[in-house]
């Protein structure tokens, strides 16, 4: 069956080209409304970014704002960058604004004391490297991807208590390994893999129904098509409910849900739809970008600059500017935190539905999306956040025995991410080593290695410190971070890789407060809106109730890199 991302790329490419002329006309800047303060720009466009400035670290300045913008994108995650690049390739001038000091969202990497760490992208499924993908629509140069494992080799390793299960490349290897481990569950295993095969159809239907125009046609057709294809059932049932209909073997269920951290919810809460997308996506292995995760944004941003646009970082957008009242309202630009107002007839928000409606739009304005906002916000809750331990090690990956595969450590096969406070029980830990996965790593950082340890967490555990400035949250906060680090090192890293003990030279801990500070998400959520049945009961589309305002990113389609990437293409269409 054709991979979803490949077929989508062909569809999206055609749609973007057809829509190019229409968009180019519709997005051109009309006359500014009375009282609107135009940004202070030079008579002609500012000079291009200096070659001395890294492409993803171009600091905001009002003197760098291009004239006569067609579109402003708020947020530089993969959804925002992809949307900006695709629009740029059909001739639009786009400005991307990012509050962080580096562009790329969760695709960015950082260096500290000679160690380099990825922050959010730890691996992508096979579809990213096969044929023409959605990413090719946005990049100015092709991103190379290194396989984490060859045919029949392990790319994900699950440690449940004293037991271990290795996930090998290839669906038939997966089937054979499961049946060898659970011989009495052969029928359930075959039934499960049959369910995963539907994911290509379900993802295509899910996307196509969001493309339907106008809204009333979507409201009529979407429920019928989703019911006929079985998508409705996948959206409305949880992972655990679906798997319990196949088997009562809790250990088998735990193995099948071993990658649940990839969608940020335990199986008892997550919709089966997101599970089938993730599980199917990784059946044929995982890949890591050659040169590190920052190469993704570095390959996209030149596409924006080539069309006269810019990607500027280090300044927060404080609000979206709206002109008029009633049915005459429309977007006219954005205002920065320093008061600079930047005009554009179209604004695309890549900062999430909650941030867009509750922070960027005037709270006194009558905000009425295509659905009751108050009820939507009750049902569509943010996903879990995370505690991340960044570990720098002395020695090469080979010397330390670090593998290219990921390791998922859980003390109890029935306990899953996010179900309990990680400090009340041994934490469930995801382990990834970018230094082992990236073939160019030894050239950049010889004799050094890094590992990232992740466990899902709730903002409530850190709520008392969220309003305090970074670096000034007190001794209690530091002590709690140290407890997390100790637990995750002992239960995670040193259990999976005992040879790393005694080789640790660097430890830094990120909490939900850290994620909130750098990403701007209210609860430090890493996957946007949680992908549970309640969220999928609502139809979030790129169009909003406000002319000129569009949404993109994880909240529009699904969680994760591929969901945000597809949303960027969808919004541009």
Image: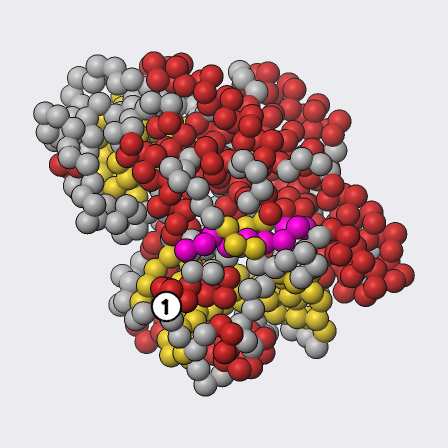
The image shows residue 106 at horizontal and vertical percentages of 42, 51
The image shows residue 327 at horizontal and vertical percentages of 37, 15
User: SS for tag 1?
Assistant: loop
Can you tell which quarter of the image residue 163 is in?
A: bottom right
Given residues 172 and 319, the one toward you in this image is: 172
Residue found at the far left of this picture: 43
The secondary structure that most of the magenta stretch takes on is loop
Report the residue at 52% width, 27% height from top.
12
Report the side of 420 relative to 234 (left or right).
Answer: left
Residue 134 lies in the magenta stretch: no
Report the residue at 56% width, 55% height from top.
147
Can you tell which quarter of the image residue 118 is in?
A: bottom left
Callout 1 crowding tier (Cα within 10 Å): few <14, some 14–19, many ≥20: some
Q: Please tell me whether residue 422 is drawn above or below residue 544 in the rendered image.
A: below
Q: Please tell me whether residue 236 is drawn above or below residue 207 in the rendered image.
A: below
Can you tell which quarter of the image residue 151 is in?
A: bottom right
Given residues 14 and 533, the one toward you in this image is: 14
The image shows residue 553 at horizontal and vertical percentages of 46, 39
Q: Is residue 217 visible?
A: yes
Report the residue at 47% width, 48% height from top.
144
Q: Which residue is mark 1?
A: 445
The image shows residue 551 at horizontal and vertical percentages of 43, 32
Report the side of 349 relative to 380 (left or right).
Answer: left
Given residues 151 and 84, the one toward you in this image is: 151
Q: Is residue 351 visible?
A: no
Part of the protein shown in magenta: 282-291
Report the side of 378 relative to 40 (left or right).
Answer: right
């Amino acid at each position: 069956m054709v991979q979803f991302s490949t077929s989508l790329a062909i569809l999206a490419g055609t749609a973007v080209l057809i829509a190019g002329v229409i968009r180019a006309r519709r997005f051109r800047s009309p006359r500014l409304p009375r009282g609107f303060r135009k940004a202070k720009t030079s008579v002609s466009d500012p000079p291009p970014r200096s070659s001395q400035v890294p492409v993803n670290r171009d600091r905001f300045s009002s003197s760098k704002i291009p004239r006569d913008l067609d579109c402003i994108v708020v947020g530089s995650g993969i959804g925002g960058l992809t949307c900006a690049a695709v629009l740029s390739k059909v001739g639009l001038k786009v400005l991307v604004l990012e509050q962080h000091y580096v562009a790329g969202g969760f695709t960015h990497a950082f260096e500290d004391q000679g160690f380099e760490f990825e922050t959010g992208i730890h691996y992508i499924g096979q579809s990213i490297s096969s044929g023409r993908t959605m990413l090719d629509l946005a990049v100015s140069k092709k991103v190379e991807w290194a396989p984490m494992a060859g045919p029949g080799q392990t790319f994900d390793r699950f440690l449940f208590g004293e037991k271990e299960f290795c996930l090998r490349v290839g669906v038939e290897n997966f089937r054979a390994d499961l049946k060898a481990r659970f011989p009495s569950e052969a029928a359930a295993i075959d039934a499960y893999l049959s369910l995963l095969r539907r994911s290509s159809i379900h993802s295509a239907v899910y996307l196509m129904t969001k493309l339907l125009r106008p809204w009333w046609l979507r409201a009529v057709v979407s429920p019928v098509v989703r019911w006929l294809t079985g998508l409705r059932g996948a959206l409305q049932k949880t992972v655990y409910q679906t798997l319990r209909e196949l088997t009562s073997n809790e250990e088998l269920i735990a193995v099948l849900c071993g990658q649940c951290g990839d969608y940020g919810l335990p199986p008892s809460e997550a919709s089966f739809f997101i599970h089938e997308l993730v599980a199917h996506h990784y059946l044929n292995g995982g890949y890591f970008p050659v040169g590190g995760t920052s190469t993704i944004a570095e390959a996209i941003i030149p596409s924006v600059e080539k069309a006269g646009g810019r990607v500027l970082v280090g300044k927060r957008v404080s609000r979206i500017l709206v002109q008029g009242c009633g049915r005459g309202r429309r977007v006219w630009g954005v205002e920065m935190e320093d008061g600079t107002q930047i005009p554009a007839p179209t604004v695309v928000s890549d900062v999430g539905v909650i941030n867009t409606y509750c922070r960027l739009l005037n709270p006194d304005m009558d905000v009425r999306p295509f659905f009751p906002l108050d009820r939507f916000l009750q049902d569509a809750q943010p996903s879990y956040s995370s505690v991340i331990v960044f570990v720098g090690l002395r020695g090469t990956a080979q010397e330390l025995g670090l593998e290219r595969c990921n390791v998922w450590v859980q003390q109890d096969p029935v306990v899953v991410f996010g179900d309990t406070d990680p400090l009340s029980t041994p934490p469930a830990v995801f382990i990834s080593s970018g230094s082992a996965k990236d073939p160019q790593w030894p050239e950049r950082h010889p004799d050094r290695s890094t590992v990232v340890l992740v466990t899902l967490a709730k903002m409530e555990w850190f709520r008392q410190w969220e309003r305090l400035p970074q670096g000034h949250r007190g001794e209690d906060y530091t002590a709690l971070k140290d407890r997390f680090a100790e637990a995750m090192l002992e239960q995670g890293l040193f259990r999976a890789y005992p040879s790393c003990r005694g080789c640790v030279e660097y430890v830094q801990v990120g909490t939900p407060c850290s994620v909130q500070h750098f990403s701007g998400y209210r609860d430090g959520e890493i996957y946007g809106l949680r992908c549970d049945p309640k969220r999928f009961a609502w139809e979030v589309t790129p169009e909003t109730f406000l002319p000129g305002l569009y949404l993109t990113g994880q909240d529009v389609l699904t969680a994760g890199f591929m969901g945000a990437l597809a949303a960027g293409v969808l919004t541009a269409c």
